[in-house]
């Protein structure tokens, strides 16, 4: 009995380089199997499937998830900075510079009189 093949895409992006691979894989393949079969881990040694998160069409997924026809696997790079920390630092800077209210954190209204 032959195994059906499905068509999928695999994407990985670096700041200056993006890779989009079109692949045919076995019908019951998992995300991890498709990534390994693609050879992308040899092309980009910085991909570590125990660290990098993956998703299908911009939704987080587990490596063990089975693929469906037309799925696009995305391999995500680790964040350089925690977005919450960046926002917190930006808000603190605005308070220090007088652009934000020191109590509420809201914008300062220069027209407002006390």
Image (tube, grey):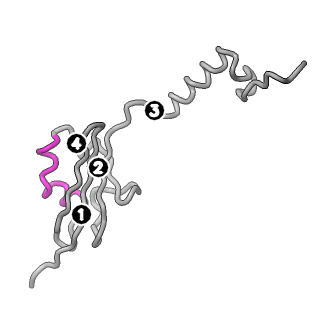
Labels 1, 2: front one: 2
Mark 1 or 2, nearer chain start? 1
- Identify the mark nearer the N-term, 2 or 3: 2
Q: What secondary structure is marked by label 3? A: loop
Identify the residue position indicated by label 3 in the image. 82
User: Label 1 vs label 2: CA separation?
Assistant: 14 Å
In primary-sequence order, the first of circles 4 and 2 is 4
Q: Main secondary structure of the magenta part?
A: helix
Per the image, the residue denoted by label 4 is 48
Compared to 101, does 41 lie above or below? below
Instruction: Tell me where residue 113 appears, x and y as whole percent.
Output: 89, 20
Circle 1 is placed at which residue position?
Answer: 30
**For discs 4 and 2, the disc positioned in front in the rendered view:** 2
User: Can you identify the residue that label 2 sits on?
Assistant: 75
> Residue 32 appears in which quarter of the rendering?
bottom left
> Toward which corner of the image does residue 91 lie, by quadrant?
top right
Per the rendered image, the range of residues in magenta is 30-44
Q: Residue furthest left?
A: 1
Name the residue rendered at 70%, 27% in the picture.
Answer: 105
Dot 4 crowding, Cα within 10 Å, few <14, some 14–19, many 20+? few
């Amino acid at each position: 009995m032959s195994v059906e093949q499905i068509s999928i895409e695999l994407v990985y992006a670096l700041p200056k380089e993006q890779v989009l691979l079109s692949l045919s894989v076995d019908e019951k393949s998992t995300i991890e199997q498709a990534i390994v079969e693609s050879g992308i881990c040899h092309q980009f040694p910085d991909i570590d499937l125990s660290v990098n998160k993956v998703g299908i069409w911009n939704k987080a997924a587990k490596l063990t998830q089975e693929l469906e026809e037309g799925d696009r696997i995305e391999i995500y790079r680790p964040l350089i900075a925690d977005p919450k920390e960046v926002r917190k630092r930006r808000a603190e800077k605005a308070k220090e510079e007088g652009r934000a209210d020191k109590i509420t954190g809201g914008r300062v209204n220069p027209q407002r009189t006390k």
